[in-house]
Image (cartoon, helix red, strand yellow):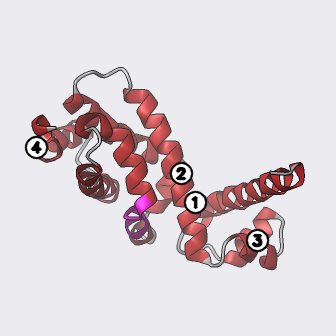
Amino acid sequence: MSSGTWLRDERTDLAAERILDAAAELFVERGVATTGMAEVAKAAGCSRATLYRYFENRRALHLAFVHREARRLGERVTGLVAGIEDPRERITAAILASVHEVRATPTLAAWFGLGDAGIASELAGTSQVIEVLGSSFLADVWGSDDREISSRARWLVRVIVSLLTVPGVDDADERAMIEQFVIPVLMSGADRV
């Protein structure tokens, strides 16, 4: 790779990040569903034509944002639960930490407001979000069984989205639901691996 290509790739990545950062601020201020591409371009300091070079439409912008944030969330949560030896407790802690991290981060919490939860639910099912959470939370339980990890990760993402859109009464209630209903399903059959 020539140094010119490397610099061009780095500039492209920086421009896309700047656009995503501007979009994040607007998502908090105005909501995800009501933020338009023209507003994102203006906030990012670029033309609409430039914005569309990086993101062909609003869905592409949303996907890029969700994928970026899922990677970041996965890294943070993995670090938070790394020292927990018991797989059941580690997965429980990872689910609860994910929910708490999203609720505590305005740019993520904005996706689960009244008018925006549908968009979040749809995008949460994308392969990249599932892959991040699956490999982060389930790989040490299921080893190299990608089919089991993928199947259980899809369900795990749905559980997390459900808790974000319809919260439990309090932290203890959410922990009890996870321990009673989620962990047994996620762990069933793990002893065969």
Name the residue nearer the viewer: 89 or 23: 89
Q: Position of residue 169 (x, y in %)?
A: 23, 46
For the residues bearing labels 2 and 1, Cβ distance under 8 angstroms: yes
Q: Which of pointers 2 and 3 lies earlier in the amino acid sequence? A: 3
Q: Amino acid at mark 4?
A: Ser
Alpha carbon of mark 2 to alpha carbon of mark 4: how far?
29 Å
Q: Quadrant of the C terminus?
A: top left
Kindly identify the residue that appears in the image at 33 percent across and 37 percent down.
Answer: 94
Q: Is residue 55 left or right of residue 130?
A: right
Q: Which residue is mark 2?
A: 69
Residue 165 visible to the viewer: yes
For the residues bearing labels 2 and 3, Cβ distance under 8 angstroms: no
Q: Position of residue 153 (x, y in %)?
A: 29, 52
For the residues bearing labels 4 and 1, Cβ distance under 8 angstroms: no
Q: Is residue 185 left or right of residue 170?
A: left
Q: Amino acid at mark 3?
A: Ala
Name the residue nearer the viewer: 74 or 180: 74
Q: Is residue 59 left or right of residue 193?
A: right
Q: Main secondary structure of the magenta part?
A: helix
Quarter of the figure with residue 173: top left
Q: Which residue is mark 3?
A: 41
Alpha carbon of mark 2 to alpha carbon of mark 1: how far?
6 Å
Q: Which of pointers 1 and 3 lies earlier in the amino acid sequence? A: 3
Q: Which residue is mark 4?
A: 188
Q: Which of pointers 2 and 4 lies earlier in the amino acid sequence? A: 2
Name the residue nearer the viewer: 158 or 96: 158
Residue 34 visible to the viewer: no
Q: Which residue is mark 1?
A: 65
Q: Amino acid at mark 2?
A: Glu
Which portion, as a residue range, is magenta?
121-127
Q: Residue furthest front?
A: 1
